[in-house]
Structures are given as C-alpha cells and as structure tokens.
Image (cartoon, grey):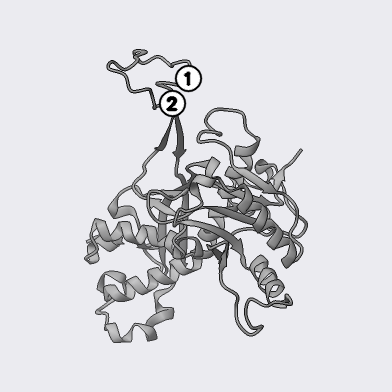
Amino acid sequence: MADTVSFLQNGYNGEVLEDLLTYTAQGNDTYREGLIHIKSGIQHKYTLPAIKLGEIIQDNVPTPTSNHGAKGPNGENEYQFTERYLIPQDFMVYLEFNPRDYEKYWKFAQPDGNLVFRELDPKVQATMLRLLMDKKNEYIGNAIWTSARGGEAVAGITTPVDCIKIGRGKEKYFDGFIKRVIDNVNATDAETIAGGQVIISGNTELADGEAVEQALYSMWKKCPKQIRKKSGLSFIIGWDLWDAYDQYVSDKQVKYSENTEVNKYRFKGKKIIPIVGIPEHSIVLGEFTTGMESNLWMGVDFANDTDVLKIDRLQSNSELFFFQMRMKMDINIVRPAEIVVHTAYRITP
C-alpha cells in the first residue's frame, strides 16, 4: 500500500467528501447564518440564467392575436434572457506537521507500528481536518465579501481610510461580493449587468449609530416593492456598525430595550444579521438563504474523490507529513436589481 492516504481509504465515501469540501465554506458566518447557496461539483463553468417577461395579458377574443414569435407593439412575446456565471478558480490549502508532536493526544487511538495516518483512528483524522479547516474559516468568510481576482492592485477600488482593502493578501482568486457590486453598477456590458444593476442607496462613511439608522431607512425606501415580503429578505451588516446602531437605539429617550440588553436584530420587520467578513461602512439588503432562491451563490469543485484531501509523508526520509487540498471556488450575485447596498467603497477614478 502506498504511503499516500486519502479519506476514502479510511471509510469516507464520495458523498461525505463533498460534505467535507463544503465544510470549508460552512465554517464562516456567511454560511452559518444561512446567507449563501452552495453549488458543488462545478468543474469549469455554471450558468445562472434568468428570464424577464414582457406583456402577457390580452383582451379575451375568439382567436388570440399572434405575432408568430415576434415582439408586439405593446411588448407581447417579449422576454429578456440573461446569464450570469460561476467560474470556480483554483487555490490550495496546505499544511506541514510532525505527527510525533501530537502523540499524547492520540494515545487513546493506540496506533500500531509506525505513527502513520493509515493506522490511526479515522475520528482522529477527522479532528485534524477540522483543526485545519478552522484555520481557513476566516479566509473563506472574508473572501466571499472582499476578494478580487488578481488582487488589490487589479481591483481598482478606493477604500475608506484604515479599512479592509478589497483584494488584499491571498484574497485574489475570485471576485467577492463588493467587487461584483462595484463592477455591476459601473458596467455597460451585457454580461456584467445581466439581471439588472444593484441599487446603491448611499456611499458615505457611517460614523455613528445615527448614520447607520439613516442608511437603513434609505435602503428600505429604495428596496423594490415586489421583494419586501420575501421571507429571506435581510440586512447584512458588520459588527462594528451593529454595535454603533445598538448603542444609538439604546440611548434614545424612548428606549427600545434596557441598556443591559441587546436590541432586536430587526429593522422594519426584517432581520439584521451582523457577520464577520463584510467590510466596514457597508450594509447589504437582499434575499439571502441557503436555497436556490438566494441572491448569493457560491460554486465549488474538486478534481476527484481521491484527490480532495491528500495526506502524505513529505519525503521518504522525513517524519513530517502534509495536508494538501486543491480547491476551486467562485461567488456571484444572481439578481443584481433585487439587491440594495450602502457602501463607502467605490471604483477608483
């Protein structure tokens, strides 16, 4: 038996491996709060189609007016077909370690012979995987919102002073939510504005709780009427803005709650969901769920079941082992015209 050991050789089947792959995305606030739909198994490209119909109502007559597929003078037979795409991009999770450093934690598993993973209890291997994934949770959670393909220099986005930069560090493999929004509202090409354009309700920095409240009112007023009653409609906000808003509401003369209590996470009856990952001075309003109706989708892929997670000795004369996980990921918004955003981030002139 070769030294290379995959989780398949320890009783994990392909279905479980797919779950392990999505765990990378699930271990962050965006997924934990149920704000994103994950589509796995996308090897190259996945199309997100949408159709908008024109006039379909006519007078009741014995023989309907037919244009044989042509567009009528009042929009009959008119429909707009648009496509947006998920195109997962490659990146890698990698860690080297010495198993002997953890011998005391593995004593209960009683490994036989050399301390290699094929002789170790699968539960211990799963624990090691969770430790590895926990270390990457922050990256995935941030990248969903602040990543930019090509990195900060290519993103061309002006950042508020002392705030998170779009495309910073390793957040360079795919375009995150803020980059998608800014590209959409400044674009003229059919692909980028497919599904309409995001509604920008404001672009000022939100210095205090009062400014946050005003931004929430403005966003609600600009929210399309046809989506206001959707159960998944939510405000997404960072913890810094929520804390400022919570204190402002508590300090009002007519209090919503006692100072020692947190105010309700709601505005106009819609949930306010504070998360880690969304950048400063930014609030988002839209339909965000784990279902297919969500306006935020993530696409992920893996090459094949045996290569999802690779555990191997670094080299034949070494005690070191490594974890290696090659992944592909992308995110996109589905119906831009149904998203309202307040953000101080803007395209660089």
Q: Position of residue 109 (x, y in %)?
A: 28, 82
Q: In this view, does 71 lie to the left or right of 145?
A: left
Residue picked out by circle 1: 74
Which residue carries the number 2 mark? 55
User: The disc labelled 2 sits on which kind of residue?
Assistant: Glu
Quarter of the image for residue 239 reads bottom right
User: What kind of element bears circle 2?
Assistant: loop
Residue 311: x and y in percent read 35, 63
Using the rendered image of the protein, determine whether residue 268 is visible from the camera's viewpoint: yes
Is the Cβ of the residue at disc 2 closer than 8 Å to that at disc 1? yes
Residue at 45% of width from left, 49% of height from top? 297
Nearest the camera: 261 or 184? 261
The N terminus: image quadrant: bottom left
Q: Is the residue 199 above or below the residue 162 in the image?
A: above
Q: Which type of secondary structure does the marked residue at label 1 adopt?
A: loop
Horizontal and vertical percent position of residue 77: 40, 21
Query: Gap in Å between the C-alphas at discs 2 and 1?
Result: 7 Å
Amino acid type, label 1 = Asn
Q: Looking at the image, is mark 2 or mark 1 earlier in the sequence?
A: 2
Q: Is residue 177 above or below residue 21?
A: above
Q: Nearer the viewer, residue 192 or 129?
A: 192
Q: Residues within 10 Å of mark 2 (few under 14, many from 20)?
A: some
Q: Could you tell me how many numbered marks the image carries?
A: 2
Q: In which quadrant of the rendered view does residue 32 lie?
A: bottom left
Is residue 166 visible to us here?
Answer: no
